[in-house]
Image (cartoon, rainbow, N blue to C red):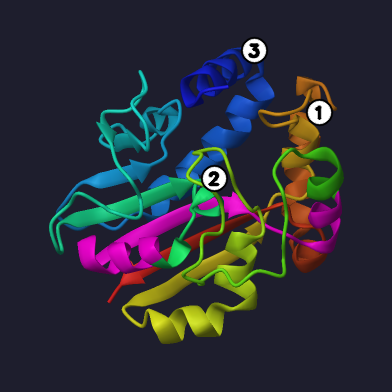
Amino acid sequence: MSLVEILREHERIWRERPFVRQLYHEWFVLIRDRLARVDGPTVELGGGLGTLRDVVPEVVVTDVEPTPWASEVVDAERLPYGNGTVANLVLFDVFHHLPHPSRFLGEAVRALRPGGRVVLIEPYCSPVSTFAYRHFHHEPVDLTVDPFAESAQSTEDAMDSNSALPTLAFFRRRDELERRWPQLRVVEARRLSFVAYPLSGGFSRPPLVPRVAWPLLRLLERLLPPLAPLAAFRCFVVLERR
């Protein structure tokens, strides 16, 4: 399937699943609240359906290919922005699709204004989620790779990926990240989503609970953070340009 065909299927799921919309809305609010308040555009890379606009109306939605929802075609590894001109780069489920994450990080350093931020929500590979991703999710998981290698981590296909890349880059090898890109300060690196995301089905599987269960799941999400290293399915990362 082409990227546009995949996104049209995602659009159908978005309309039909209020549980997914509610979950993503809360994540969008989290993103909005961490955006840098400096001059320059807020750019979403790999913006998909552009639903972040519901919470961040001024965001410039881009994608790696032309789509009906994107304002611009932008390659995250070759940003078409001048040095020090961008306020925020938002990546929602995009970093783990990048063939060369190190090239993106270098471009982020170049393009962001001082005080500008990279804000990401990505898969997280805990013991529980790694088992689930490997057995019930279509995207591969390889925790043995070097996330900063010059060799490609995936093909040029926009949907190719390695769900382990964010865990490796921002948690397991954070010291190397900070050593190689000292201009990017890690403001926040949080594990989140323990039951709500897997039970929602996301965009790839049917939901496992009815909508009326949402208040209970939100309560569980507030109680389970002590188990984050063991059971988190997602991570939230904020990097700031020094």
Nearest-to-viewer mark from 2 and 3: 2
Which residue sits at x=74%, y=38%? 138
Looking at the image, residue 101 sits to the left or right of residue 71; the answer is right
Tag 3: amino acid: Glu
Q: Which residue has dot 2 on it?
A: 93
Lower position in the chain sequence, tag 2 or tag 1 = 2
> In the rendered view of the protein, which quadrant contains the N terminus?
top right
How crowded is the residue under tag 1: few (<14 C-alpha within 10 Å), some, or many (20+)? few
Q: Which residue has dot 3 on it?
A: 16
Nearest-to-viewer mark from 2 and 1: 2
Q: CA distance from mark 3 to mark 1?
A: 17 Å
Res 148 label: none
Answer whether residue 87 is visible to the viewer in this image: yes
Q: Position of residue 128 (x, y in %)?
A: 85, 56
Q: Which residue has dot 1 on it?
A: 213
Tell me which segment is drawn in magenta.
Answer: 103-131
